[in-house]
Amino acid sequence: MTADPAAPAADPGETVADPGEIVAELDNLRVWFPAPGGAAVRAVDGVSLGIRRGETLGLVGESGSGKSTTGLALLRLVDATCGSVRVGGRDVTWWSRRQLRGLRRRVAMVFQDPQASLDPRRTIGASVAEPLVVHRLVDSADARRRRVAELLEMVGLRADLADRHPHELSGGQRQRVGIARALAGEPDLIVLDEPIASLDLSVQAQIMNLLRGLQRDLGLTYLFIAHDLAAVEHMSDRVAVMYLGRIVETGTPEQLYGQPAHPYTAALLSAIPVADPKVERHRRRIILSGDIPSPVDPPSGCRFRTRCPQARPDCAEVDPVLVEVAAGQWAACRYAGEAVRAMRAGTVGEETVH
Amino acid sequence: MRERTDRPTRPGRAGATDRHEPAGPDIAEPVLAIEDLTVTIGTRRGPARAVAGVDWSVRAGQTLALVGESGSGKSLTVLAATGLAPRTARVTGRVRLLGEELTALPEPRRRRLRGRHVGFVFQDPMTSLNPVLTVGRQVTEACEEHLGMTRRQARERAVELLDLVGIPSPRQRVDAYPHQFSGGMRQRVVIAMALSCEPDLLIADEPTTALDVTTQAQIVELIADLRRRLGTAVVWITHDLGVVAGVADTVAVMYGGRIVEQGPVDAVFDAPSHPYTRALLAARPGPGVRDGDLPAIQGSPPSPLDLPAGCAFWPRCPVRGDARCEHELPPLVPVAPGHRVRTFYPLSEDA
Ligand SMILES: Nc1ncnc2c1ncn2[C@@H]1O[C@H](COP(=O)(O)OP(=O)(O)OP(=O)(O)O)[C@@H](O)[C@H]1O
Ligand SMILES: Nc1ncnc2c1ncn2[C@@H]1O[C@H](COP(=O)(O)OP(=O)(O)O)[C@@H](O)[C@H]1O
Ligand code: SF4
Ligand SMILES: [Mg+2]
Ligand SMILES: [Mg+2]
């Protein structure tokens, strides 16, 4: 159970890790999709982000904020409109299809719906073996079988499941297969796009434990995309909050959950229900009015201003950049810190429902 | 809301009912009460016993949360209770809606009672909305029929309802189509629809599961506010224990088609006494387990085609009892006033 996120921070700053080696990096990345009438859906609109070896970077934000598109860009499954994608120190933004085969060994992905991401006609063994074959990582059928068995055991499945088909497995088992497949190429980075969202409640903790265990044992690096903010807090070393194609705040979970500096982070956190009726009864929520605006035509100045309970007139004019508000904590708000304090002290609350 | 004449006056509807005030004698009659409800579905692979021996009731102005994982029988319970179970289902047990025994009624009368007194909100608003009709038409469709309104009255009422559920500029939006609305706004429209006949009971089946946490907070506030103002009884189905803590007066936890724990919300969260409830609450990530593994429950939930003979949770249970757990169905036993658990080994508070 999470403590009331409105409570003051315990002790920020102390866990700021050594910068370390950057495994993957986005620099001012934009991914625009064509929209009807010659307009563009600005799914990702100026994101800069570095992912360090061995860490889990959590990525949160409302539906449509551009999280999945950011993840797909790291595998070059969508093309950059401008900006760059670097993996393992190399600029892969414009790599050819042939070069990308190598990239997709370095960066793997696990999807939300394990049902949809496995081919129903193939055996589990064949699905897990596919990356081994594509990347020529095994030189005999025997070696392939052995490696598949090893991968299945790594994710806590019996090796004899290799002969089964996806429909014979539970949701949790299928997600384990998806993870085994992602591990096959021994990637530097795994993009986990909502990996627990479609699982049974009593199975989610198993998968989180598995992911953390694998990370410990194999030194994996994760980009963990999720809606469940409590899961993100548990899994992540650092968290980035996205809103309408931009990162509006980053920092450690302790910093963000304890002392958010951006009004959007504060609102998002205050919306999480807490599994404690006494806390729920007495907490004051910051309820955002309305919905996330269309990424075809984002608001001028600060993108959050149309829903920001603290928006001031000049927020419409100046597009705020990320500034460091505490060691390792960055927020893109002209009134970072101050605005959140005012929100929490003030009257913003239930009456904003309408 | 509008004055209405055809409504039997029922005490307890007027004004706000405080969540935790004990129910007065005049609202003692539950709005919906189900007893020993069992649903068996015929499937290609044999009969699936999806719901068994479920008892609960909900009173005016109160919210009952039905919580459990996917497939535990939450939706079928309310569908069967309101006569909406699939054709392949066999339903037994007793259901009383506003004191009337539904199971004894012929279908047309049952349908009328349901249409008049029960509103539904489902997970995906588009299953309730017709894409080619304006939202205004749809919001009042049901009550035009039930309350005999003219088109003009209905349109006015639609504007009023859209306003009630917090749609900005309802007069401009009343002629819009569902696709012009976001997911959260569509769910508001469905809630307006569900409220159009001023139902005594609102059944909300995972109404926020498909929504963002920010939109979820809006919908939770909206339903809580409407319940307070209109005195509606609410049955809220969810798998999110956080949502339960925020909306419920009483909770029924389902596992493998049965209620395994049931009681006032504070009792269930403060002293979860069934091993499943306790394990589920403990497995949630929180500050206490930041650096270790989560105390996960092993295995996965049972299939209704292949239920264990005794306690459905036995194969996964951390307590694991003895042969009795494996072979005998534990009864629902009281552990505190109004708080019951289906286990041979109820856990005490300090266990
Ligand atoms: N191939 C595409 N063509 C056009 N628009 C797209 C495409 N992919 C994504 N978008 C749009 O880009 C925006 C960001 O989408 P994205 O899927 O990255 O969001 P997300 O944060 O992952 O959301 P969710 O939480 O719903 O998964 C959305 O408005 C989406 O509709
Ligand atoms: N129309 C149906 N035909 C066959 N099985 C069904 C049908 N509806 C539900 N079931 C089964 O009954 C069980 C309980 O379903 P449901 O009440 O929908 O669960 P919940 O709402 O808790 O997720 C599940 O195993 C489900 O697969
Ligand atoms: S810049 Fe202005 S509108 Fe944007 S988040 Fe800060 S206070 Fe709100
Ligand atoms: Mg996504
Ligand atoms: Mg359901």
Image (cartoon, rainbow, N blue to C red):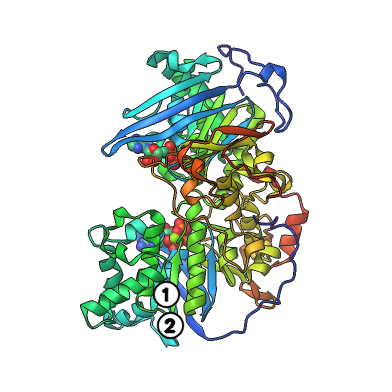
Compared to residue A159, the image places residue A219 above or below, namely below
**Horizontal side, residue A181 vs residue A312: left or right:** left
**Horizontal side, residue A125 vs residue A6: left or right:** left
Q: Which residue is mark 2?
A: A87
Tag 1, which secondary structure? helix
* Neighbourhood count class around disc 1 (C-alpha, 10 Å): few under 14, some 14–19, many 20 upward: many
Say whether residue A325 is visible: yes
Mark sitting earlier along the chain (2/1): 1
Asked if marks 2 and 1 touch (Cβ < 8 Å), the reply is yes
* Image position, residue A258 (x, y; %): 70, 64
Tag 2, which secondary structure? strand
Compared to residue A246, the image places residue A1 above or below, namely above
Q: Chain of mark 1?
A: A
Numbered label attached to residue B6: none
Quarter holding ligand 4: bottom left
Count of marks overlaid on the render: 2
* Image position, residue B80 (x, y; %): 43, 27
Residue reaching furthest to the front: B323
The image quadrant of residue A60 is bottom right
B194 vs A20, nearest the viewer? A20
Numbered label attached to residue A74: 1
A90 vs A334, nearest the viewer? A90
